[in-house]
Amino acid sequence: MQITEIYKSLQGESTYAGLLCVFVRLMGCNLRCAWCDSEYTFTGGHKMSLEAVVAEVQKLSPDGGLVEITGGEPMLQEREVVPLMQSLVDANYTVLIETSGERPLEKVPQEVIKIVDVKCPASGEGGTFRMENIATLNRRDEIKFVLSTRADYEFACNFTCEHDLASKINAVIFSPAFRKNATGRRDADQCLLNPQDLAEWMLADNIPARLGLQLHKFIWDPALKGV
Ligand code: SF4
């Protein structure tokens, strides 16, 4: 499979935020989100066998723990990534996959926790989520909406309520988008949507979701890769 990078850091998103995690970042994405912070995955990378990826994960985290399969869009390499996820599960890792849900998710192993980033209108990739994937979600999975406008927020609220997500999955996360190419300052002013506004809207509307900030962008320089 084609890999951009494998590294250990703190998980910055989802309900697993703050935990040590090994990230396996696959090369390539078929979307072009307006605020994408992973454009360096679109090209390049290097070929690695399943065995070499598992060995690298074991080197970074020998005693099990959390591994996130991410990208880019990892499900573009479904034929290689599905056996990889199964091998990591079999080796006693807790495996997360971060995906846009544009590709089918039926073949993701049951034990793997899906973190699905449903694209909102201002991303420029709204409508790309494959609706059939809703049926693949279970009580351990999470849906994340990355928001940069009030219209994105309203889209996320409607999607959450229409599909009764709160009763079907582990968490619905509303996360303010970070400014593309943000660098230097590590503060909320770098978000495209003010987290305080988002918090107040959620309170006013009684939304069954949690507000998620990208923790790593408040710890390290937001432009830093491999953290
Ligand atoms: S799906 Fe992810 S990697 Fe692909 S363009 Fe959007 S933010 Fe970037």
Image (spheres, rainbow, N blue to C red):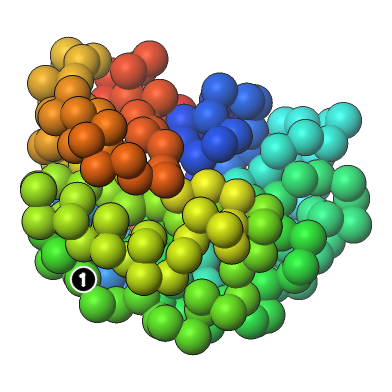
Image side of residue 157 versus residue 135, left or right: left
Image side of residue 183 versus residue 44, left or right: left
Task: Answer whether residue 185 is visible to the viewer in this image.
Answer: yes
Res 8 quadrant in image: top right
- For residue 128, above or below residue 146: below
Res 79 quadrant in image: bottom right
Judged from the image, the quadrant occupied by ligand 1 is bottom left
Picture coordinates of residue 13 (x, y %)? 46, 36
Query: Quick one: 203 or 159, which is closer to the camera?
Result: 203
Q: Residues within 10 Å of mark 1 (few under 14, many from 20)?
A: some
Q: Secondary structure at mark 1?
A: loop
Image side of residue 46 versus residue 123, left or right: right
Picture coordinates of residue 160 (x, y %)? 37, 60
- For residue 82, above or below residue 215: below
Query: Quick one: 89 or 56, which is closer to the camera?
Result: 89
Task: Answer whether residue 56 is visible to the viewer in this image.
Answer: no
**Which residue appears at 23% of the width and 15% of the height?**
186
**In the rendered structure, which amino acid carries the disc numbered 1?**
Gly
Quarter of the image that includes the C terminus: top left
Q: Which residue is mark 1?
A: 126
**Which residue appears at 13% of the width and 36% of the height?**
193
Query: Quick one: 52 or 90, which is closer to the camera?
Result: 90
